[in-house]
Amino acid sequence: MKHLNVGLIGGGFMAKAHSLAYATMPMFFWPAPAIPVRKAVADVNLELAIDAKNRLGYEKAYGDWRELVNDPEIDVIDIVTPNHVHAEMAIAAAKAGKHILCEKPLARTAKEAKMMLDAVQAAGVVHMVAFNYRRTPAVELAKKFIQEGRIGKILSFRGTYLQDWSADPASPLSWRFKKDVAGSGALGDIAAHVIDMARYLVGEFESVNALVKTWIPERPIQQSGVDKLGTVKSSDDTPKGVVDVDDEVNFMIHFESGAIGSIESTRNAHGRNNYITFEIHGEKGSIFFNYERRDELQVCFADDPVDAKGFRTIYTGPAHPYGEGLWPIPALGIGYSETKIVECYDFMKAIVDGNGVSPDFNDGYQIARICDAVLESGTRQEWVKISWIE
Ligand code: NAI
Ligand code: SOE
């Protein structure tokens, strides 16, 4: 069986999720397309890299990601760092002939994402961007129903991604609140996941019209380290810095198909945790998904008997997408890790088969164009066509 040596860049939240997937994917999908080997990890210095190596089960540690990218033993580079370094790292990895998995958002801007796309295409390597939520079996089931025409022509898409970890002004100014590091706020960080699902399920965006707000314009400066997502508060005397990204974006969508839609996203919605939802209305039925109840897909079909018409719940399991590898009984519990395990499986399979995989860097680029258009629309207060964004 083929082994693929993984070089991971970054040792924070996503490093844990991806490493868990490398360790466990073959336990779910056997025979695995390839065995991922946790070969080496890099962080900003050797001390952090060694800590990540020991914690996450890697063989080698590098204090400089460039050494990792140029390590001849490495087949795959996995970028799980903050967004401002994705482009430099991915372009170097492509030039070194490595296959690349890069966390979302692919880049801070469409321009940066395009450079990454050009680099992987020139190098001929397999590339994937980690919009993992579409790999929830219930989301894949929604895709299957749409493809089979079960809800007919799609009329509208209504999506949300709401969290509350940044609602407290004492939550520190981590990298996620700095435009030069993150690119944007709630938009690129979380709305981008819903944009990915909207493109996947409904199709390309034609134009957007957005409201963009920053509710908390300054926060206590976080000195360094990983983003603790509001769980560690700053003391009252911590110096403050400016938040120059959006806290909330709400926007309307014209899809190229003629469907219409909307997406609402904020990290300041008290009481909401990882509230990713979409409701899709078609001429022959409706579909509703809520990630906080991710074993379930709610469906209503127009031809249901009139006295029994209404949303009903399907619990995903062996009869559904990825059911052959995941758990043998519906509702045993699909978790966040499972989305990453499936992502890892599809990525490894694409490398071994020599095929592309979706979402790839082109998807990441198209999503970056939509994000740029949302910000542009927020500033201009008018509809912005995606075709205007390079
Ligand atoms: P984090 O703040 O927890 O960890 C970032 C890690 O990268 C830290 O270990 C840091 O020291 C390291 N790092 C920073 N600059 C580096 C450099 N130049 N060289 C080597 N290492 C460097 O961040 P988190 O939450 O893991 O986010 C990383 C990426 O994953 C981001 O792009 C984020 O948007 C994405 N993400 C995706 C999620 C998903 O569900 N798909 C969930 C959380 C984050
Ligand atoms: C913080 O908002 C965050 O970790 C995002 O960065 C992820 O992309 C999201 O999936 C979970 O929340």
Image: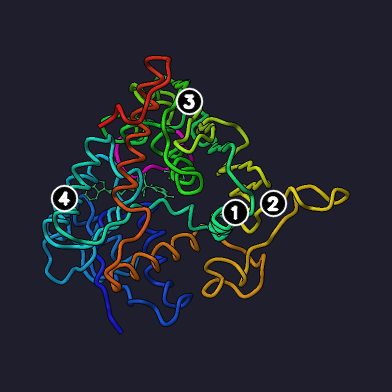
Which residue carries the number 3 mark? 169
Amino acid on which the number 2 mark rests in the picture = Val
**Residue 267 horizontal side relative to residue 354, left or right:** right
Q: Mark 4 points at which residue?
A: 119
As measured in the structure, the alpha-carbon distance from the residue carrying label 4 to the one carrying label 1 is: 37 Å
- Is ligand 1 closer than 8 angstroms to the Cβ of mark 4? no
Q: Residue 299's mark?
A: 2
The answer to whether the residue labelled 1 contacts the one labelled 3, judged by CB atoms less than 8 Å apart, is: no
Q: Can residue 239 be seen in this view?
A: no
Q: Mark 1 points at which residue?
A: 149
Sequence-first disc among 2 and 1: 1
The magenta-colored residue range is 223-233
In space, the residues marked 4 and 2 are separated at their CA atoms by 42 Å
Q: Position of residue 87 (x, y in %)?
A: 21, 44
Mark 3 is on which residue type? Pro
Bin the neighbour count of mark 4 within 10 Å (Cα to Cα): few under 14, some 14-19, many 20 and up: many
* Cα distance in 3D space between marks 1 and 3: 46 Å
